[in-house]
Amino acid sequence: MNEKLEKIVSLMERDDSTPAPADSIRWAKNLFAAHAIAKPSLLRRLIATLQIDLKPHTAIFGERSASAQHERQMLFVADDVGVDLRIAESKKTFRLRGQTLSESFVPVRAILSSESGAIETGFVNGDEFVFESIAAGVYTMTISSAETEIVIENLSI
């Protein structure tokens, strides 16, 4: 065993081969890099726009009763998808319930993110989602399906 090891060390010491040219090394490395490039995503990203924002404890225009709603209701639209959000105060935190309004948009997940981190939830019943115990602040909500992302920016809670 020692003879083989000594022979290997002797060969390494007598090695007088020259390194490969730099352009050949670069070409060989690029062969591997070409396979690492990801294919472009076919995911569409839509920015939702606010259509209606009904604040709590205020009468709705044209409402006949004197009662006022107890939660904030917001309607956003992105392309042909509507997003209905309901925000209710619960002690010092908030509860956000939402629903996508479209036959063609099948949601997979919803993410509510802010500067401090992200809260993620799965959909509870097909097109409905819920976020519990949210602190007041400004958030970005992303609702994703297999092909489309709907983004609601600057969502004040």
Image (cartoon, rainbow, N blue to C red):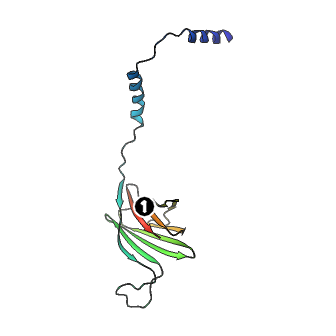
Element under disc 1: strand
Place of residue 53 in the rendered image (x, y in percent of width and height, measured from the top left): 39, 75
Q: Residue furthest right?
A: 2
Relative to 85, does residue 1 appear above or below in the rendering? Answer: above
Q: Is residue 93 left or right of residue 48?
A: right
Instruction: Look at the image and tell me whether residue 125 can be seen.
Output: no
| Quarter where residue 2 is shown | top right
Q: Dot 1 corresponds to which residue?
A: 143
Relative to 69, does residue 124 appear above or below in the rendering? Answer: above
The total number of labels drawn is 1
Place of residue 38 in the rendered image (x, y in percent of width and height, measured from the top left): 40, 41
Residue at (38% x, 84% y) in the render: 60
Relative to 23, does residue 149 appear above or below in the rendering? Answer: below
| Quarter where residue 80 is shown | bottom left
Residue at (38% x, 33% y) in the render: 34
Q: Nearer the viewer, residue 71 or 106?
A: 71
